[in-house]
Amino acid sequence: MKRKKKITFGITAVLLVAVYLYYFIQNEKSLNISLAGEEEDNNLNQESKIHEDDRHGKDTNRPRYSRHWKNGIHLSVVACGDRAEETIVLLKSAVLFTTGPLIFHIFAEFDFQPMFKQKSLLKDVDSLLYVDTDILFLRPVDDIWRFFDQFNSAQLAALVPEHEDKAASNYRFARHPYYGESGLNSGVLLMNLTRIRKSTWIDSMVKYYIQYKPIIRYGDQDLLNIYFYHHIDELYVYSCEWNYRTDHCVNKSICKDIERNGVSVLHGSRRVMQNEDQPTFKAVYTAFKEHNISLRKERDLLTNLKKLLSKTSNSPCGQIGHLAYTKYIEEFVLERKTS
């Protein structure tokens, strides 16, 4: 049974990105997509209820965020002109497997600000998933959104460690404070904006930026590390399968969760999805790039992905086997076949 998907773009973007998205939309005619300047949904702002429950010690592990899915999962992407194609492939991967409506907020860098269609601080958005453009979802976005249900009453964001091996983490050379033994990677960030607005987040970030600006190497990621070094109780940490990078496989497989569960979110940092440095990552990217989602033939995606991955089995990240990259797609295809 074919699913109809409604996707609303709450776009805070430059016109250049909007043009690329318009081209994408025109070529994916099976999707019901509307472009809007800023989609406001007050039903998403559950601020009073959430914090009232937290203050009175009620069960914070109940599925609070399931009610948001009917209104849409908010996905925030930072894009720039030379990475427009990458952004489109990201959106394609998110749309392909996710069952509910998605609301995209696309931000562009400072140089493009004169071309902004509209500026927004997302004042009416309760929570969102903030990702880099070099991300591919290999399973439904709904699944990562469910981590909000695991937050305790103090936690306002979720991130993955920068490295599973502290001796190999870039943060071992950092001259500023960082979270834990190996730091955090900012590529896949869940944010409870309601709680962030009530916290010291903004004031702290400004203070840390001024204090550490001369020694910051990785921009927002360093600031997040500094913040959660000082506010350790406000962070939820999830597994490397949700932000899987070449660092996890280039020398040896150090993300053991993907050997059991498969890769959930692939992160092609250092542009490995376009260059020849790590052919396994490029193979996954190419399969999604070439896939025509308007035909609704996910089996074709799976077939092409296996074909491309078979050529990378001798590469460092290919030696763990193609099943790590195809597990959830195979389950999705099987589910569609039997439905």
Image (cartoon, grey):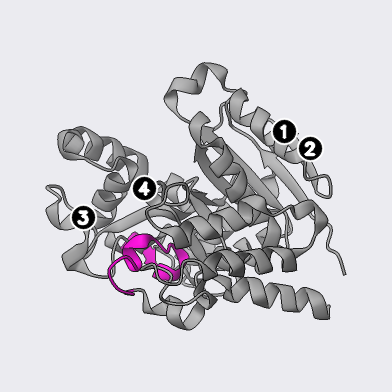
The residue wearing badge 4 is: 270
**How far separated are the C-alphas under marks 3 and 2?**
42 Å
**How far separated are the C-alphas under marks 4 and 3?**
14 Å
Residue flagged by tag 2: what amino acid is it? Answer: Gln
Q: Which of marks 3 and 1 is nearer the N terminus?
A: 1
Describe residue 95's horizontal placement relative to residue 249 as left or right.
right
Q: Residue at x 56, y 18 (%)?
A: 115
Q: Quadrant of residue 85?
A: top right
Residue 322 falls within the magenta-colored stretch: no
Q: Earlier in the sequence, mark 2 or mark 4?
A: 2
Circle 3: element type: helix
Circle 1: element type: helix
User: Where does the magenta region start and end?
Assistant: 233-254
The residue wearing badge 2 is: 26
Q: Quadrant of the C terminus?
A: bottom right
Q: Quadrant of residue 156?
A: bottom left
**How far separated are the C-alphas under marks 2 and 1?**
6 Å
Q: How crowded is mark 4: few (under 14 residues within 10 Å), some or many (20 or more)?
A: few
Residue flagged by tag 1: what amino acid is it? Answer: Tyr
Circle 2: element type: helix
Residue flagged by tag 3: what amino acid is it? Answer: Asn
Judge by depth and name the residue closer to the eye, 139 or 334.
334
Q: Residues within 10 Å of mark 3 (few under 14, many from 20)?
A: few
Q: Residues within 10 Å of mark 1 (few under 14, many from 20)?
A: some
Q: Residue at x 27, y 46 (%)?
A: 222
The mark found on residue 170 in the picture is 3
Between disc 4 and disc 3, the foreground one is 4
Of all residues, the one furthest to the top in this rendering is: 114
Judge by depth and name the residue closer to the eye, 273 or 151.
273
